[in-house]
Structures are given as C-alpha cells and as structure tokens.
Amino acid sequence: MTDCVIVTSVVETSDKPLNYCNRRSNYTHKQRFEQTLETIDSVRKYMPSTDIILVECSPPSKYMEELSKKVDYFFNLEFNDIVVNSPEKGKGEATMLLYVLSKLPKQYNNIYKITGRYLLQSTFDKSKCEETNNITVCRTAKYGMNNGMHTFFYKIPSSCILDLKNALENYLLTENKCIENYLATHLTNLTFLEHIGILVRWAVYNTTPIF
C-alpha cells in the first residue's frame, strides 16, 4: 500500500464572516488558486511517492479544471453551505475531510492532511512522522493556544482513521468549539512534533511562520 496526501482547499471563498474575523481571506481567488498550485508542487517535491487527493468547494471554473489536472484524485463539494458559509471554519474542514475519508480510492498505509496554500519546506522529514503509529501533529501551544493540535498538517495511520472519523463527526455536533482543541482532547493516540517543516499562510493574518 502507498500513502496519500489530502489537500483541503477553498479557492473561491464567500464573503460571509468567520466567528473570529469579519473576512474569510486576505487573498483574492486568483492568489488562493496560485497558492494551492504551490502546495501541490511542494507535496510532489518532498513526498514524491504519495498520491495527492484534492478536495475543493468552489464552482466549476478554469481554476478547478487546472487544479484537477495537477492531482491524482479530485473531489469538489461545490456549494456545500457548511464549508462555504459557516462562521466556524473548523466545521468546513471537518466536512471536507469526512467526505474524502468516505471516498478513498484505495487503501493507504498513511494519510497525510495538508491545508491548501501551505507549503512543505526543505526541513520536512517524512520519516519523523512515521516513527510512531499514532496521529502525528504539531502542538498549538507554540503559537499561544494551549491544549490543541494544529490541523494544517498531520499524519493519520490507517489504524487511526476510524478514531479520527468519529472525532470529526462528533465535533460537527458541537457549537462554538475550536477544532484544534476539540480534536486534541478527543483523540488519545497523538504524537506531537516540535517541527514539521511547513510554511503557514494564515488566511486572515499577515504572518507566515514556519512550523
């Protein structure tokens, strides 16, 4: 069995506010498209033997046509209201992940999740993620959030997929919960890395740290 990388992406964001910000993105649709292409290129470069599955939530367009050609598998939840308009950004992410996990084209040893527009860096070491059979993540405490796991990149071994699906399904039933904190407190099989090697492009903040 091989590994795969799920890229979650919304190129054409709506104008609905988030619960922590009155805008969904600092970037134009064209910029988000170009940044997602860069994400895919970085995965090809640093994880060359993995399948890439892109899950989008944008209307059919030249952006979607070109993106679909760059990946091995392409899914589009176009017009899904939770993904496009929910003020809780984590709800959209959970919806997209659950959709893909229910439609995996084959069995994989490990599934990696990366947020679209974020970039793997030369310091990324896939072998570090594979040292345990746990879900491998980066702790949010290093960015001022306690008891959380960053969801912009993590590894899910096949043995943990059901646990993650259950946690995501239960998270969707909550209100005003941070997905980073919720998953970290409802998943017991976590291993935290001090460094992953990923450049983070926050959608609404101007900093671009490397974790």
Image: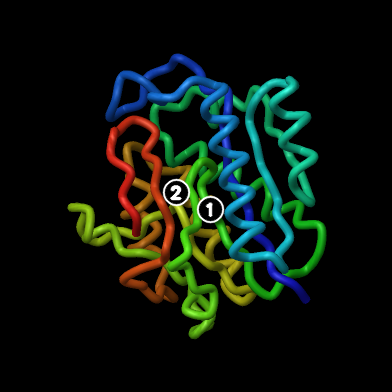
Residue 170 appears left or right of 158: left
User: Can you tell which mark lies on residue 133?
Assistant: none
Q: Amino acid at mark 2?
A: Tyr
Reading the image, the residue beneath label 1 is 114
Q: Secondary structure at mark 1?
A: strand
Q: Tell me residue 156's x, y (percent).
A: 56, 68
Q: Tell me residue 6's x, y (percent).
A: 63, 53
**Quarter that holds the C terminus:** bottom left
- Based on the displayed image, in which of its 4 quarters is residue 42 positioned? bottom right
- 156 is higher (above) or lower (below) than 73: below
Q: Tell me residue 2's x, y (percent).
A: 75, 72
- Based on the displayed image, in which of its 4 quarters is residue 57 positioned? top right
How many other residues sit within 10 Å of disc 1, few (<14), some (14-19) or many (≥20)? many
**Front in this rendered view, residue 197 or 9:** 197
Earlier-in-chain disc, 2 versus 1: 1
How far is mark 2 from mark 1, CA to CA?
Answer: 19 Å
- 144 is higher (above) or lower (below) than 64: below
How many other residues sit within 10 Å of disc 2, few (<14), some (14-19) or many (≥20)? many
**Quarter that holds the N terminus:** bottom right
Q: Amino acid at mark 1?
A: Ile
Q: Tell me residue 185's x, y (percent).
A: 33, 63
Reading the image, the residue beneath label 2 is 171
